[in-house]
Amino acid sequence: MEDDRRAKLEHLRAAGIDPFPHSYEGVVPSASVHAAHEGLEAGEETEDAYRAAGRLTAKRDFGKSAFLDITDRSGKIQVQARKDVLGDESFDALTGLDLGDLIGVDGTAFMSRRGELTLKATEWTLLAKSLRQPPEKFHGLEDTETRYRRRELDLMANVEARELFILRSKVVAAVRRWLDERGFLEVETPVLQPLYGGALARPFTTHHNALDRDLYLRIATELYLKRLIVGGLERVYELGKDFRNEGLSPKHNPEFTMLEFYEAYADYEVIAAELEELVVHVAAEVGYEGEIDFAAPWRRVTLKDAIEERTGIDVLAHRDRDALVAAAKAQDISLDPTETWPQLVDELLSKHVEPGLANPTFILDYPVELSPFAKHHRTQEGLVERFECFAGGMEFANAFTELNDPDEQRARFEQQGRLTEAGDDEAQPFDEDFLRALEQGMPPTGGIGIGIDRLVMLLSGRSSIREVVLFPAMRT
């Protein structure tokens, strides 16, 4: 089959036809042509001329005429080719094209007798010769591994895949508009960092040859963004890639897209209200009609109460590892006695609470041990002003009233160092540069990180992050 396509390629070149021209201007999306003729009656013709372009996805030959389907990003349009209009040579060349070839067509719009909007071709141009067989038309591309590894084939074969990634683009655009309209400045901070920080995670390490030093791919943008708050930018956001050297799962990809925004003079209650407003706005912008109820206000429950409701364990009454392991055992829950107390609390939350949170829910007021960058709670000793937001059985946002006391931040870093010594390889390293910035003075600040991939999962009804990432990480 590929040999036949290559033979056609050489035949085109021998005939003086460029099978890969440089440009083709004036193309109108197929959806725009359809929209302009919604009221056309079956059999009705127009003199409206259009230039369409896309991939040849179907051919139906009737001797002196043929019908072809051209598919572009916006949809599909039928083309009628007639020998008496195009001439013998042009007609035969057009109908001799292979499925998968990219073509451009000039023609006038009419409604076929069967009620399908069609372009009557007056001219056509080959835009790119396809040298490989496209995915099978009627069944699309169904093999999951192939869909992820060869996303171009998935997009080519499956309308649903194209619609999903168009939706993702709309989500990102809507997020940016919402922030821009509220005076937030989009900024860019280093992806390669001399010291990773801003999250509890393992980094990817790389080596800079010219500097002869190891650098880290960022696990978060938090610390750099808060340094910009110190500098007086007041409202900043960054939407980009973070990297965490962790396992693959339906909710985890080592490279993922994160939005973080920080706002001077706000606290976590302000940020919670803004998260509700932002997500409701984005859901409306993309026409969300799924099962999750995003209408505000969202449910709010403390971490202590959420875990106790699902497990019967009061984690704050068992504030050391051994006591918590024993309390869990009394509830027939097995915890790993080699893990740290914060790790055990996080496991109770992620395994026993998170999966049951279908509609958006704020889990509030975390123990200080789990939150090295959050400000102490104004009324609850031993807690910090932090929330995570969950929906669809997964966490998709994490926010604080940001810690701005440099001496307290130094003590938190020292506590993280003790956790590292106890075996926690995801603890936060000591960052003296960030402390120096805090010592300049940072105003009261609220900040949040929102997983864009997970937000797209929620808004598209997908259950795996690999579905919403164009080229996800794959096992060999």
Image (spheres, rainbow, N blue to C red):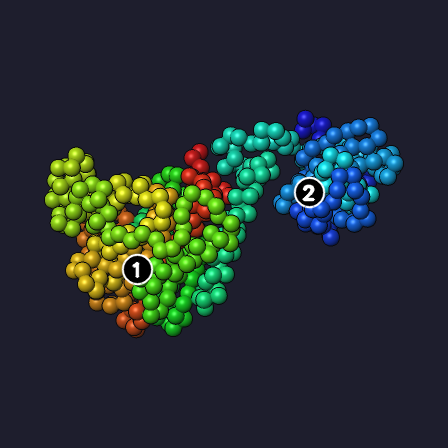
- Residue 322 quadrant: top left
**Is residue 247 in view from this perspective?**
yes
Q: Residue at x 73, y 34 (%)?
A: 114
In the rendered image, residue 457, in percent from the top left (x then y), is placed at: 44, 44
In the rendered image, residue 137, in percent from the top left (x then y), is placed at: 63, 30
Q: Earlier in the sequence, mark 2 or mark 1?
A: 2
Residue furthest toward the top? 1
Assess disc 2: are there few (<14), some (14-19) or many (≥20) residues with their C-alpha within 10 Å of its C-alpha: many
Query: Which residue corresponds to mark 2?
Result: 54
In the rendered image, residue 339, in percent from the top left (x then y), is placed at: 20, 43
Mark 2 touching mark 1, by CB under 8 A? no
Q: Mark on residue 400? A: 1
**Is residue 242 in view from this perspective?**
no
Q: Residue at x 63, y 45 (%)?
A: 74
Secondary structure beneath label 2:
strand
Q: Mark on residue 274? A: none
Q: Label 1 sits on what residue type? A: Phe
Whole-angstrom CA distance, mark 2 to mark 1, is: 48 Å
Q: Nearer the viewer, residue 97 or 448?
A: 448
